[in-house]
Amino acid sequence: MLSGALARRYAQALFELAVETDSLDQIQEELQGLTELVQSNTEVEQVLYHPHISLTEKKSLMDKLVGDQVGETVRNFLHLLIDRRRQNLLPLIVREFTQLADDKRQVIEAKVLSAVSLTPSQEERLKKELSRLTGKDVRLVSELRPELIGGVMVQVGDRVFDGTVAHSLERMREELRKTPEKEPQGIGVR
């Protein structure tokens, strides 16, 4: 819980600076790139999180790795996290920052689970329908789940729309369990 609260505070401060300097898109893009760099390279992750490597060495290494891929604001923010030994919060901070940026832009994220990949036209129709339902722009995040058999499950915030074959079969199974067995009635027999 403490990590989440700290991440929110750091994200809020960086978000306010990004809005103030009119660089929200740039900072968000740079943060996501930085997070991907750290999470995709275990050696970088180990050095960044290692307790016996000096703060100066960590900052120097990160400066060399990111080069000119990040601006001064994100570079200074990373240095601040390293100085305060909070670099492990970077993924949480980026998630919180993205949520704040999405709220400002009136964008919601919809997680789409499906057994097979959706075609671009299916994704576009889904985005339009979700946009109509929510009144906001929609960003789809797709994930394949073969166990769903067919159809899609969409999660928007805490709401779930389940149109999967697996869910339909489960509902049918439950209905069959609820239906009381009736005695067969003979025709014309009393």
Image (tube, helix red, strand yellow):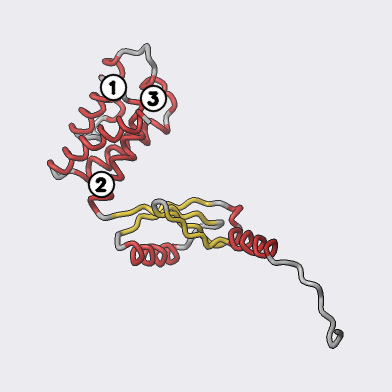
Say which of 48 and 163 sits in front.
163
User: What is the secondary structure assignment of the residue under circle 1?
Assistant: helix
Please provide percent x and percent y for residue 20: 13, 42
User: What is the secondary structure assignment of the residue under circle 3?
Assistant: helix
Q: Is residue 45 left or right of residue 22?
A: right
**Sequence order check, earlier mark of 1 and 2:** 1
Q: How many angstroms separate mark 3 from mark 2 (CA)?
A: 27 Å
**Amino acid type, callout 3:** Val
Q: Quadrant of residue 108?
A: bottom left
Q: From the image, tell me which residue sits under label 1.
A: 82
Q: From the image, tell me which residue sits under label 2.
A: 101
Q: Give the mark toward the camera: 1 or 3.
A: 1
Q: How many angstroms separate mark 1 from mark 3 (CA)?
A: 13 Å
Q: Give the mark toward the camera: 1 or 2.
A: 2
Residue at horizontal 32 percent and vertical 25 percent from the top: 87
Residue situated furthest bottom in the rendering: 188
Residue at horizontal 45 percent and vertical 65 percent from the top: 122
Checking the image for residue 148, the label placed there is none
**Amino acid type, callout 2:** Ala
Q: From the image, tell me which residue sits under label 3.
A: 44
Crowd rating for badge 3 (residues with CA inside 10 Å; few <14, some 14–19, many 20+): some
Crowd rating for badge 1 (residues with CA inside 10 Å; few <14, some 14–19, many 20+): some
Please provide percent x and percent y for residue 78: 26, 27
**Amino acid type, callout 1:** Ile
Please provide percent x and percent y for residue 113: 50, 54
